[in-house]
Image (cartoon, grey):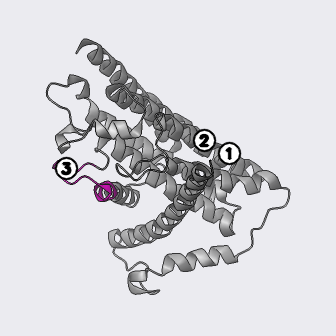
Amino acid sequence: MRLTLFNVVAAVIIAIAFAAVNAAYLVWAERRGAARIQRRPGPNINGPFGLLQPPLDGIKLMAKQLTIPGGADKVLFIAAPVLAMFPAIMSFVTIPFSENIVAKNMNVGVLMIFAFAALGSTSLLFAGWSSRNKYAMMASIRAVSQTVAYEIPMLITTITVVMIAGSMDLMEIVHQQSGSFLHWNIFPLLGKSHNILMPLSFLIFFTCTLAETNRSPFDLGEAESELVAGFHTEYGSMGFGLFFMAEYANIVIGSCMTTILFLGGWGCPFGLFPGVWWFILKLYLLIATFIWIRWTFPRTTIYGLLNLSWKILIPLSLFNLLLTAGLLKVF
């Protein structure tokens, strides 16, 4: 019992450290990437290539005092950043990075991650409501409506993969894609006609991941030019820092799920030497795509954002699910 408790505590500590390091240096990578795209230097003074900028920013945030606005709901105001970070940390516990690197493998790992992801929208609503700021409240309503709209096609698409794999165990889903890259779910296979729409499933899932993490062109909950700074307008110090860490942790989790569901997890493209480094390579290539999209495409409107989900992605994902179910029954 003590060993199990120790393992759980160690896994949570490692997950927090992993999320913190990723949040710090993905910000650095994003700032450098944005600078390259916009043809400017980016952070390059503190340390070689500006590598000391993230820890200095972290120290600055931790040194500042958390100020609570007058009339705000203090309990919800303080709880919202913690509630934003908690689901992201717990989701890392069940993600398998390789055959042997997983804190706690569960036969319902997919369900667990979606259950924790649902708590994220609650934190956004708490942040906007408790701030007593009309712009923050409007932004939180936008963010929650966006999250609900894109969780539906994402979940339906995930059900399609679960039906094909016959399991909600993330390790089992990866095992069924073992071999060369032609066995990955993103590629339709001859003789497996129920996989024929997997490229469409991948596009739907990746688009929903962009929207779920409030990334441009779907960052309507943080539209600085319209809503000051979004649902965390009144937050400073580590309150803002926790929201920032949660955003980048969710980007990593979304990229991990995309890798597991569609890109063969830790499998090598050539069927040789599978391992954690292949998983990490796929993971950060997807994150690089997140950064490229953010600094390339303009922000959409709130109506275009919601119409894309309700009128296009949800019908497509439902059609994909029904067709996959029918093909599985026949073949």
The residue pinned by badge 1 equals 125
Tag count in the figure?
A: 3
Image quadrant holding the C terminus, namely top left
Residue 28 x/y as whole percent: 44, 72
Q: Indicate the quadrant where residue 298 lies.
A: bottom left
Q: How far apart are marks 2 and 1 (CA)?
A: 7 Å
State whether residue 303 appears in this view.
no
Q: Give the range drawn in magenta.
A: 267-282
Is 270 part of what is drawn in magenta? yes
The residue that appears at 49% across and 62% down in the rendered structure is 18
- Check contact, mark 2 vs mark 1: CB within 8 A: yes
Q: Is residue 178 above or below residue 277?
A: above
**What residue is disc 2 on?**
144
Q: In which quarter of the image is residue 208?
A: top left
Q: Which of 83 and 205 is in front in this view?
A: 83
Please provide percent x and percent y for residue 53: 49, 79
Amino acid carrying label 1: it is: Leu
**Residue 205 spot, x, y in % from top left:** 38, 39
Residue for badge 3? 269
Q: In this view, does 315 lie to the left or right of 81?
A: left
Mark 2 crowdedness (10 Å alpha carbons): few <14, some 14-19, many ≥20:
some
The numbered mark, 2 or 1, whose residue comes first in the sequence reads 1
